[in-house]
Structures are given as C-alpha cells and as structure tokens.
Amino acid sequence: GTYTLAAGTPIYIGADRSGNNGHYFILRAYNNEQVIIDGSLQTAAFSNLVSIVNAGYIKLQGLTFANLSGITGYGVFMLGKSHHIELQNCTFNNMSWNTDLPEAKYPTGSDYMVPVRIHGDSSTALSNVVINNTTFNTIAPGVGDLVLISGNTSNITQTNSTLVNIYRQQARTEFYVSTTGNDTTGNGSKAKPWRTLSWALNVAGYDYSTVPATLLDSNLTIYLRGGRYYPVSTGYYIGDNRGANGKWTTIKNYGTENVVIDGSQLNTQYAFIFGISGAKYIRIDGLDIENLENDSTLHAGGYKDVRYGIIVTGAAKHIDIINNDIYNMHWSRDTNKIKNPTPTDVLSAISVLGSTNTPITHLNIENNTVHDITPGYAEAIAINGNVDTFSVIGNEVYDIANIGIVAAGNYKWVLTNNPGLLPENNQSRNGLIKDNEVYRCLSPIAISAGIYLDGSKNITVEGNNSYLNGVGISVGNEQDSSTGTGHLVKENTLYHNLGSGIYVGSNNFTSHVTNSVIKWNTIQNNYYIDSALYRRTQGRYGILDPANRWAEIVINRAENITFEENEITSLSNIMSAFVFGQSGLIFRYNEYYTASNDPCNVYFVRDTTNDGVADVFYNTFHMYAKKMNLDRTSTLGGVAYNSSGCGTSSLATPAKDGTIQVSTFPNPASDQLSVRIQQPATGMVQLSLFDLSGRLMLTQSKQVPAGAQLLGWNNLKQYQLLPGVYFLHVRTNGKKEVLKVLVR
C-alpha cells in the first residue's frame, strides 16, 4: 500500500535501531508487494522521507520513495557516523524541487532535490554504504544529484542503477516576460516572469559566475506573454554583446498569444521601438509593432525628430525580422503637414543602414505585414548603406505614403552622418526581393514605386506583385556621379499602377543604371484610373482622363539593359518611352498588346536630344523596331516585326532647328497660355505641350497664314495640368522650336 507521511514527520532510524554484530535491521516490502513511502504532504524546506542518523547495519529493501516535490529536500538522508547501510532494489519516483518539470531544469543556487543524501559530519567516517539495483524515475535534482556524497565518508558503492526521465540541470535558454511579471522578484521563468523586455534583454542568458558576465553558449528565446508592452525613453536597444557567441537570441510571442509593442510612450529624439546596433544572431518574430509618431517639439541641434519602428545599424549580422505586423506609424498626424513633407520629415517602419566599413550581412525580412505608414521622405522598408547579402521575402506592404520597399546606395547623407564610411562601401548589394505583395504605396508629392532599386547593386527582384502604386517597379539611381548595376528583375506582375508599370534608368544627368536584365515579367493595364487614389496623390500624378495615358515602359539613362520575354499590355496605344539617352539596349522576345492591338497604330516615343522631352514618335511597331533596332524578335498584338511593314518607308527625323519666331505669354501661365508665331509662309502649325517625363499633355494643329498669328489654350485648369515646368514644341513648315513654360 501507500504510506503517506505526515508533514514534517519522516521515518527516523537512529542509533537505537541499529543492528548488532553484523545482524541487520531490515525495512522491506512484504512478499514483493508494492510499498510506497509517500511524501506528498511535505511542504517545509529540507524535508526528507527517511532519516538514518548514527545508525549501523540498516537495510532498506524493495521500497518505493515517491512524491516529494515543490521543495528542497531529500529522499533517504544518511547522517553522522552511520555505517553498513544498504539500499537494495529500491525505487525513487517523482521527486523534483519544482512541480513544473520543464522549469525544473533551470534551478538557482538553492534549488535541489536529492533522492539519496550521504553526509559524514562526525570525526568517525560515515562508511560502508551499498546502493544496489536502484531505479530513479522522474527526478529533477536541480543543483543537487541523484546520490550526493559529502563530508567524512568512506567505502561508498553504487551499482546497477536505472535512470528514467531525469531532468538534469541546464542553463536556462527560454525566458519569459509578462505584463504581470516583476523584474525584481522574477527569474525569467514561466512561473516567475520578468516585467519588461528591456530587463530581459539586459540579463537573459548571462552567466554571472564569470567576471565579466558571459553569454551562455546556447540559443536563447525570450517569450513575451500576451498583452501590450510600452518601450520607454529611446526604445528597446540590442547591442553588439548579443550574438557575439554565435548563438541566436529570439524575441517572440508565446504560443498564439497576441503581443503588442506600442511605441506611443517613447519620448526621446531619434527613438526606435527596436534598435539593433552591431548585434548578431537576433530574431524578432511574431509581434505587433505599432503606434509611432515623430515629436515635433524635439529638435536638438536644429534637427527634426526622426523615428524608426525597427532600425538595424553598425556591423550587424544574421538578423531575422519575421512574422510581424508593423503599422500605424506617421512622421506627423497633422493632415495638412503630411500633404507636403520636406526632406527632413522622416519616419521608417523598418530601416537597415550599414554605417561602418564592415557590412551588415545575412539580413532577412520575411513574412511581415507593414501597413498604414506615413514615412515622409523615407520608405516602409529601406535597405541602405553598407549592406551585403540580404533578403526581403513574402511581405505584404500596403497603404504607405511613399515607396514600399527600397534597396538604395550612394546617398550623400549616409556619408555625412557616418564620416568613417568609405564611399565605395555606401551601397546595398547582393539582395533578394521576392514574393512580396506591394500595393497602395502613394506619395503625396512625387511618383512613388512599390519596389525601388535606387543606386544599389546586384539585386534580384523576383515574383512580386506590385499594383495601385505610383509605379510598379523602378530600377533607378538618383545620386550624382554614381551607378546602379547588376540587377535582375524577373517574374513580377505589375498592374493597375497610377503611372507606368516599370521605370529603368537614372533621372540624374551624371548617373546611370547599367548591366541589368528585365525578363519574364507581366506588365499590364497601368495608368489605371482610380479617383480615390488620385486624391491621395493630390493630383500630382495619376490621371482621371484616359486620353492622358502614357507609356507602360519608361527607359531613362541606362546602359547595357536586356529587356526580354516580358508580356506588356497597355490600356492605350502608347507602349514605351526612351528618354535622356541609352546605349547597349537589347529588347527581344517580348509580347506587346495595346488597346487596338494594331502594330500600325501604336506609339513608341524617343528623346533624341537627351533633354527628357520626347521629340520622335514612332507610330507603328515596325517603324520603332527598325529605327531603334529593338524588339525585332518580338510581337505586337500577335504580329511579328516586318522590316518592310507599315511605317518603315517614312523614317525621316524632323528638323530640330528653325528660323520661325515663337513666344508665349503669360509665362508663368495660370489659366491661359497664348503662343505668338511669326512665320514666313502659310503652313500647318502643330503645338504640343509635354511634361518633364515626356508625356504629351496638350496638342493643337491649325493651318495659319504667313506673318504673326496667335494660338494657344484658354482655361488651362480644365486640362488638370499640375503646377510645374512643361515643354512646348512648335512645328511648322519643317521647322521646330522648343520653349519652356511654367504653369502655376
């Protein structure tokens, strides 16, 4: 049967119970019946089930000692000058210093449970102890052991032990933080969690027995229990001490519990929710990260406040940002301010900035949702500076008031803010942007791409869906005297963007995009009309009138670009625009489709003067392919190129210089634009007004006599012209003039 011991009342065997002259006192199970000595009522520290004190010739045989848990204590305790003690065929079962067995693996210095304790505290040795054929089952000894021997002892033998489910002491690798925890009394266990993540980041996984304290040589996980956490002051900082041992530190939600990291209480300039500086092997997983706003009252040194959801800097390595929901972050909540941000109005949801000459490497941003971000002049996800080898995979990025994802390089401000960084290292490179869903990324002031390569190097952009943005994908390079190069853009779907499907090339007169391949993409139905999204852009880009549609593909300053095996569908009959000059272009095996699907009714436009204004319009597919030596293996509307097809017999380029006299007034124009023309003979006058991207905005043709004549447009506002610079082309009698016009 089961013999349950009363609290504080062990079986006591003293000297008066000793055997005599080699004859043993034996306590044993009768006839192999099961006998359990049960300690379940013991609650005091240092309790035990059997005490053998100064006794001799004692034998315990065939007994089970069980159920001593949740305290420090002992099963069988031998003390003093005891001698000739035997434990034969006994079992020790369910003994643990902690009733939570998984937690019992992580004791502190006073947490132990010892099934057999032997301590000689007399000048006469405790001697001649035999422990034979013993089973230890479900034991958590803590800092103790199954058999613990100390003091003045001799001739102790242990044979034929069987061990089952032994919970040995381990370094704690799993830590817990809870909104109901306590940083002072907690130990980071599930039962006694800490209160703040800041405390956990400071102490979790450190071995304080060494000086200085060292990180344990194990991967660590900090579990956040469900609830809302508020980083304060600057935010949660993770420095270069983390990961120095090559082991991961993971910060994640526990189970399926919802964890919200709320940045609304940050009160320091340049604050972040998570700041990772030079750290290694850091993983942030499964969190809601929300509520961040720049503080306009903080402007130390004349600089505005800048905030970050997650920022990675220094020489960080092996950083995983995965499975998070990042949202509700705004450089300002002033609805008037956010319509017109300046270059110093900056907030970023995820910003990675390689700021030293040792690159950030092995960065992975995967399976996050990033949305409802007003970043000003920043982006939702930005990779910039000295970053080598990174991936941005499987994220959903939407409702961003600027660019969704950018891999950038050559920014001057990066060098200014990090004086030791060499210019040749100031370029993100060797990256993969794959399988992301990017939509409604719309700046209120300038055309914004869903995915942007801006001066970076060797980036693969693959399998993404980019739609309802300003541009689907832009492969560009904004910075002076620099090159973006080595990109592969493949298998993406770019559709229903407010502007073109894809831009390739630099808009800077001293820079280029080179040696890149655009292939296997589906580019379709861009210059999409959406009045609600048009209002988001404040009418600064996008269209409301189908007649204002422009090119699906825009090629700017670019060299050695291969554009092949893509499928391009235009909602208009305008397909491609080549502006600012290119060289080494290879266009082949593409399939083009237009509104008419007629190769004799399509526009490919070209800027032959490198001023950004289209001055040649190829109005048939065959004419374009023959003149530019591009796409001769491609089709339009299913029709292959024909060297003698429609339009190929009239390829003369109009004269660019003339003697006609042209003037405009008023200039700047507001509601009316008048054009005065002085020509020597009667002729057809054609007026064409282009914006800076080469898009035709207005056109007018009229037969006029010799002499001075007045043409133009009244009520410019009805044409929805945005304020800015335009180019007016005037052609008559084989002559051409180009004038700049300012519309306000």
Image (cartoon, grey):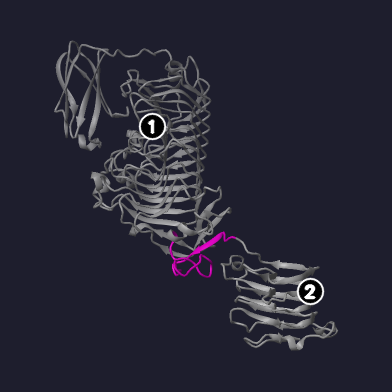
Q: Amino acid at mark 1?
A: Asn
Horizontally, residue 627 falls left or right of residue 299, namely: right
Horizontally, residue 256 falls left or right of residue 231, namely: right
Which numbered tag is attached to residue 13? none
> Looking at the figure, which quarter contains the N terminus?
bottom right
Give the percent coordinates (x, y) of residue 407.
43, 37
Residue sitting nearer the eye, 146 or 535 = 146
Considering every residue shown, the one lying at the far front of the view is 123
Q: Amino acid at mark 2?
A: Asn
Give the percent coordinates (x, y) of residue 677.
17, 18
278 is higher (above) or lower (below) than 72: above
Q: Which residue is mark 1?
A: 410
Q: Is residue 552 visible?
A: no
Horizontally, residue 571 falls left or right of residue 658, namely: right
Give the percent coordinates (x, y) of residue 57.
80, 81
- Label 1 sits on a secondary structure element that is loop
Q: Which residue is mark 2?
A: 128
195 is higher (above) or lower (below) than 669: below
195 falls in the magenta region: yes
Q: Residues within 10 Å of mark 2 (few under 14, many from 20)?
A: some
The nearer-to-camera label among 2 and 1 is: 2
Q: Residue at x 35, y 14 (%)?
A: 653
For the record, the magenta segment spans: 171-197
Circle nearer the N terminus (2, 1): 2
- Label 2 sits on a secondary structure element that is strand
> Looking at the figure, which quarter contains the C terminus?
top left
| Main secondary-structure element of the magenta-colored stretch | loop
